[in-house]
Image (cartoon, rainbow, N blue to C red):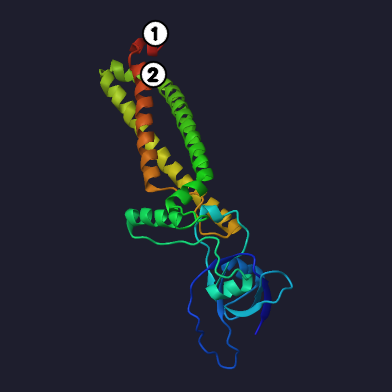
């Protein structure tokens, strides 16, 4: 049996049964739950006996590790480095000597109407109480991520505009290199509309193929980013996500831009006289 001393830095109040299954040959201790980061860093396992205390060197309470919890995918907890311990409510009260006081608590309600009534009742109960809806707390704590999201959206718009211009320039150069082929087709009696359609179809096919390759690179990059940062922060949170909506939007956008760029390049060449394209006039 290993015994460790644990200084309680942060705790989450969790209601749990007070009974503990009897273990033959071992002294019975009340159980606690610790997060996986603490278990990894301290080398703790389920069944280990630890001493929890509010301050280093202070008398503590001997407990047994009954469960190891995994961190949730909460962006607001990424930068926090403290460990978390879940224990019985009376254990926490005794350990911290705070009696019947709490810093915060959560209440589940049935629907928006019940939530509004609960918020109003708590705020009117006594001075010093302040209730907030969970969505308001989420908006407040996610303000930084909203700014980052808008920044990424601006980068995306700039990237799309730059890629559209780049695609148009490339297609103009490629189509211009085929001026002799276009001139030969025109002299053979192929109409301008047919020449333009063939160039547009080719440009759209190239754009779709490029989108597929880009989607593959995006999925690979997202996988590498998630593997790296999930290991750094030890969280299941996904830092990069390529959703079906993003893939559909990218494919549709590339198809439209490719067809439009191909049409502009083809129209520029199709309107030129075949002999001019051949350099005879």
Against 34, is 104 above or below?
above
Count of numbered labels shown in the rendering: 2
Taking the spot 72% from the left edge, 70% from the top edge, the residue there is 56
Against 105, is 217 above or below?
above
State the residue position of label 1: 280
Local packing at callout 1 (Cα closer than 10 Å; few below 14, some 14-19, many 20+) is: few
Residue 102 occupies which quadrant of the picture?
Answer: bottom right
* Lower sequence index among marks 1 and 2: 2
Local packing at callout 2 (Cα closer than 10 Å; few below 14, some 14-19, many 20+) is: some
Secondary element at image label 2? helix
Say if mark 1 contacts mark 2, CB within 8 Å. no
Residue 60 occupies which quadrant of the picture?
Answer: bottom right
Let me know if residue 49 appears in the view. no
State the residue position of label 2: 180
**3D distance between C-alphas at marks 1 and 2:** 11 Å
The x, y position of residue 196, in whole percent, is 31, 23
The x, y position of residue 6, in whole percent, is 67, 72
User: Which residue is nearer to you in this view: 96 or 270?
Assistant: 96
User: Which residue is nearer to you in this view: 27 or 150?
Assistant: 27
Against 229, is 29 above or below?
below
Let me know if residue 125 appears in the view. yes
The x, y position of residue 180, in whole percent, is 39, 18
The x, y position of residue 266, in whole percent, is 35, 21
Taking the spot 46% from the left edge, 25% from the top edge, the residue there is 165
């Amino acid at each position: 049996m290993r015994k460790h001393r644990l200084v309680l830095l942060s705790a989450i109040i969790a209601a749990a049964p007070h009974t503990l299954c009897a273990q033959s040959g071992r002294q019975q201790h009340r159980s606690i739950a610790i997060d996986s980061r603490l278990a990894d860093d301290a080398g703790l396992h389920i069944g280990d006996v630890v001493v929890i205390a509010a301050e280093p060197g202070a008398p503590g309470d001997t407990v047994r590790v009954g469960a190891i919890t995994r961190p949730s995918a909460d962006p607001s907890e990424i930068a926090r480095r403290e460990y978390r311990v879940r224990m019985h409510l009376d254990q926490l009260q005794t350990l911290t000597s705070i009696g019947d006081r709490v810093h915060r608590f959560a209440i589940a309600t049935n629907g928006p109407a019940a939530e509004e009534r609960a918020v109003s009742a708590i705020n009117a109960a006594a001075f010093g109480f302040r209730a907030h809806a969970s969505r308001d707390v989420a908006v407040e704590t996610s303000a930084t991520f909203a700014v980052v999201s808008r920044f990424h959206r601006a980068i995306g718009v700039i990237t799309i505009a730059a890629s559209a211009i780049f695609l148009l320039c490339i297609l103009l150069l490629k189509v211009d290199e085929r001026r002799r082929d276009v001139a030969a087709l025109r002299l053979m009696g192929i109409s301008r509309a047919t020449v333009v359609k063939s160039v547009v179809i080719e440009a759209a096919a190239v754009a779709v193929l490029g989108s597929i390759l880009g989607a593959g690179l995006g999925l690979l990059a997202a996988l590498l980013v998630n593997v790296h940062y999930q290991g750094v922060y030890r969280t299941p949170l996904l830092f990069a996500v390529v959703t079906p909506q993003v893939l559909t939007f990218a494919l549709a956008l590339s198809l439209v831009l490719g067809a439009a760029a191909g049409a502009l390049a083809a129209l520029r060449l199709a309107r030129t006289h075949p002999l001019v394209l051949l350099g005879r006039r």
